[in-house]
Image (spheres, coloured by chain):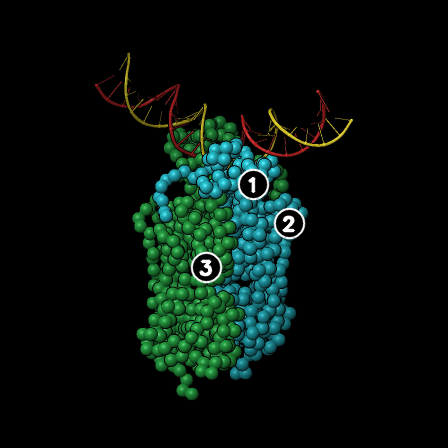
Chain colours: A cyan, B green, C red, D yellow
DNA sequence: GCCGGTTACGTCAACGTTGACGTAGGAGGA
DNA sequence: TCCTCCTACGTCAACGTTGACGTAACCGGC
């Protein structure tokens, strides 16, 4: 069954020898090109089958004129994050449809790691990359872009020009969330956000400010907590907020894991029915909690589809001006965002 | 900034010309091999920098004797499933550590799609593959294995010999779950499982049977529902079970999405505090529900690490006998599995 | 019978890189 | 002084494949 035998992999030459034709003819048959008679085709196919021949795409793409590797790179922050993995899946589906495979990596929001991964992708001559840009400078991204690699940024726009990008309605949806809380009578609405270096965090914060302003509320600086990377930091920050003399009556948590962290604290203190909560980013089972968690839901498959569409268009030579596609998010009301301020 | 100019990518030849050395010397410098004087090294580095040279790994691995592509393939069922994506991340971390990139694909539990993806990986000459075998026959997997591609199966063992594999304690943990329910006094314990073609489903079902037997309970065939692929089918099945003349007082849901489906129905009927529930596979926020969901938790990072460890050992030439590693799962008690049968 | 066109092949070089091997020059030892 | 060994390069071919181009055989039409 399993032979550890170190035999060479069969090549076109081997197939050609067995079928008594030239390698060029084998190439024609394998690639389904015309110029081979029916019986020769059958002979070559049979030879390939008996030898267990597999075409070598790396050799092929090295030689071919189009130089395609039929592979794209995907560089997200953390592939185990549900947002990232849903996005990956959407891109992958579209890629498969084009006969393209996906090289996937997690940058952990570290731009030096992102740079390394980008170089690795570049060394493998991927046809294009879909990137969730790490915070901080984007020199490596720009450099790669400038070398001519088709590139689409998702979730966060580039700090340099000339590159397609797909984001969601971060600011507008955040404003909407805050306005909804204000409409219920909340005056002390806290903002809990991820790293300030992230564009999405900034946008959502701006939306928060706009919401407050539009509702005629004044900003209480001490209700703003940022740089909460991960649920643990969010928990700590939420506790601090609730321990304030005049604690917030509503929380706007501007990221996935931050929402989870805040939820944990509210539940631990039995406040989940008293303090309103709206989170940015949906997550599984948000509807099954008590109360259900009101969230701003991004259209993740939509974003992924759009990003894939753009990257493949660019790969196919589309040279139209760069696009910044904005895929709308929607407020999903489930209860936690519909709690009015308590009367005490 | 962005020049669409169709200029050729610089190669070693270009660098060599600029640095006034031979391509072989450039190769030595790029690969950090000895045999180049310090000032030549500097000259070559400078030339590479000015030209924006990037080594071409495909050409390199074509020519090199070890033939490594520094790439492995990962073929899971659905990369957007939290179990799969956590596994992917664990494998990816270990791969990165070895300077290896990951080509990821979703087989959707369709063995003909899996075959196609496997051929794609093979054409790219990946150094090895980590596969969650699709249900049904595994001819394509075996064929690939027999060609000498290092392979590790995760979650489900191979139906053929000679291949490493990493699974969890499906049967033992399922038995333990059922015994816990029986110990609380439950006599009508339902089994809800995924596709019967899946080895994990079969194992968990066997564990369920063993649990019943060990507790001295007799199997009620009508309490067994299988082939529930996805939360929707699970919902329907759960409703049917609850509508029986003598409905079950406890549910053992043998997969992720099945658990979610059952939970939805229990909540919709207000039974979440009356009908006991233990699920196989943990999921995010299971602890924050009311009641918390008792689950059998697999050690996903552990499984991923082990799988990665095995595949890289094989790639590095380890020829010891094939291993079937079993990573223990643990019962996590959160409430839903600790509900005693109601007295009516 | 001859000519132009088409079909079905084959030959050859090249894609970018590296292994095998060659060589010039200097260092070091007897 | 001569020989050996080492260092720092260079030359060449080959990895598996395909683009460009060559060619022999055949077909149809006049």
Query: Which residue: 62% across, 47% down?
Result: A314
Query: Which residue: 30% across, 48% down?
Result: B320
**Nearest to the observer: residue B42 or residue B5:** B5
Q: Which mark is residue A322?
A: 2
- Residue A294 vertical position relative to residue D20 in the rendered view, above or below: below
Query: Which residue: 62% across, 75% down?
Result: A183
Q: Nearer the viewer, mark 1 or mark 2?
A: 1
Tell me the element at label 3: loop
**Mark 1 to mark 2 CA distance (whole Å):** 34 Å
Q: Position of residue B290 (x, y in %)?
A: 46, 77
- Please tell me how crowded label 3 is: few (under 14), some (14-19), or many (20+) other residues with Cα within 10 Å: some
Q: Nearer the viewer, mark 2 or mark 3?
A: 3
Q: Position of residue B250 (x, y in %)?
A: 41, 77
Identify the subunit bearing mark 3: B
- Residue A94 vertical position relative to residue A219 in the rendered view, above or below: above
- Residue D20 vertical position relative to residue B293 in the rendered view, above or below: above
**Mark 1 to mark 3 CA distance (whole Å):** 31 Å
Q: Which residue is mark 1?
A: A31
Query: Which residue: 42% across, 50% down?
Result: B142
Tell me the element at label 2: loop
Q: Which mark is residue B135?
A: 3
- Residue B133 vertical position relative to residue A278 in the rendered view, above or below: above
Identify the subunit bearing mark 1: A
In the rendered image, residues at marks 1 and 3 fall on the same chain: no
Q: Position of residue A98 (x, y in %)?
A: 58, 50
**Nearest to the observer: residue A70 or residue A215:** A70
**Mark 2 to mark 3 CA distance (whole Å):** 44 Å
């Amino acid at each position: 069954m399993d032979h550890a035998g170190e035999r060479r992999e069969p090549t076109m030459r081997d197939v050609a020898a067995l079928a008594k034709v030239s390698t060029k003819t084998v190439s024609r048959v394998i690639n389904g090109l015309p110029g081979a008679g029916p019986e020769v085709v059958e002979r070559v196919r049979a030879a390939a089958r008996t030898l267990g021949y597999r075409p070598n795409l790396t050799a092929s793409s090295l030689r071919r004129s189009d130089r395609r590797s039929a592979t794209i790179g995907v560089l997200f922050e953390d592939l185990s994050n549900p947002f990232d993995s849903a996005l990956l899946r959407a891109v992958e589906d579209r890629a498969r449809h084009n006969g393209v495979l996906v090289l996937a990596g997690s940058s952990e929001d570290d731009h030096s790691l992102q740079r390394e991964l980008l170089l690795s992708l570049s060394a493998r001559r991927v046809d294009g990359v879909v990137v969730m840009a790490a915070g901080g400078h984007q020199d490596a991204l720009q450099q790669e872009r400038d070398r001519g690699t088709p590139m689409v940024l998702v979730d966060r726009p580039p700090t340099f020009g000339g590159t397609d990008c797909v984001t969601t309605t971060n600011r507008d949806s955040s404003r909407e969330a805050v306005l909804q809380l204000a409409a219920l009578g909340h005056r002390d609405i806290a903002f809990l956000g991820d790293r300030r270096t992230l564009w999405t965090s900034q946008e959502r914060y701006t939306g928060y400010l706009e919401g407050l302003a539009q509702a005629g509320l004044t900003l209480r600086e001490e209700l703003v907590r940022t740089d909460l990377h991960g649920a643990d930091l969010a928990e700590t920050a939420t506790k601090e907020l609730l321990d304030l003399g005049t604690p917030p009556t509503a929380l706007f948590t501007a990221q996935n894991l931050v929402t989870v962290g805040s939820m944990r604290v509210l539940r631990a203190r039995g406040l989940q029915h008293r303090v309103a909560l709206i989170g940015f980013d949906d997550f599984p089972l948000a509807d099954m909690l008590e109360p259900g968690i009101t969230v701003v839901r991004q259209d993740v498959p939509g974003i992924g589809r759009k990003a894939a569409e753009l990257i493949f268009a660019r790969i196919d030579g589309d040279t139209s001006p760069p696009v910044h596609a904005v895929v709308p998010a929607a407020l999903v009301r489930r209860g936690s965002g519909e709690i009015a301020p308590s009367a005490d």
